[in-house]
Amino acid sequence: MPNLTGGFVKLLGLRIDEATADRVVIRWEVRPDLHQPFGIQHGGVYCSVVETAASVGASLWLAGRGTVVGVSNQTDFLRAVREGELTAVGTPVHRGRSQQLWQVEITDGDERLVARGQVRLQNLSAA
């Protein structure tokens, strides 16, 4: 399992509350250094969190059989957020021999959907 406390995860301030092969939960605080120029959460942060949640879950499912790499990330931004805590929940849609598809929903503190995305990942064999 890769280090989930450093690097880009640390830069974004992500806290991984739950990480299993069936569900990944990530929380983070919206803060000014993650805003786009108009003072709302940057869409790239949503894309990054969606990719992170899917990759963590997919990696845990594939486990010692290999690694995964994202090949497609489609993220929709539904509600502008300026502050507060956001929660991302990732779950698998499909897990096959060569690819996986994960969906991730991001909600605010009032449980309103603010973004949703899906990531298609390629399973790379360890051999």
Image (cartoon, helix red, strand yellow):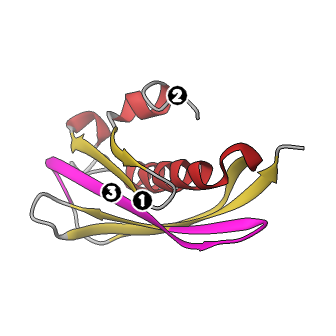
The amino acid at mark 3 is: Ala
Which residue in the structure is indicated by mark 1? 23
Residue found 35% across the figure and 60% down from its top: 89
- Identify the main secondary structure in magenta: strand
Which residue in the structure is indicated by mark 2? 3
**Res. 40 visible in picture:** no
Residue found 26% across the figure and 42% down from its top: 28
**CA distance separating discs 3 and 1:** 10 Å
Residue found 52% across the figure and 53% down from its top: 57
Q: Decide which of tag 3 and tag 1 comes sooner along the chain.
A: 1
The amino acid at mark 1 is: Arg
The amino acid at mark 2 is: Asn
**CA distance separating discs 2 and 1:** 18 Å
Q: Which is more toward the observer, 93 or 60?
A: 60
Q: Residues within 10 Å of mark 2 (few under 14, many from 20)?
A: few
Q: Which is more toward the observer, 54 or 31?
A: 54
Is residue 50 covered in magenta? no
| Mark 2 or mark 1, whichever is nearer to me | 1
Residue 9: percent from the left, percent from the top? 43, 34
Which residue in the structure is indicated by mark 3? 88
**Res. 46 visible in picture:** yes
Q: Is residue 98 left or right of residue 74?
A: right
Q: Under tag 2, what secondary structure?
A: loop
Q: Is residue 115 left or right of residue 65?
A: left
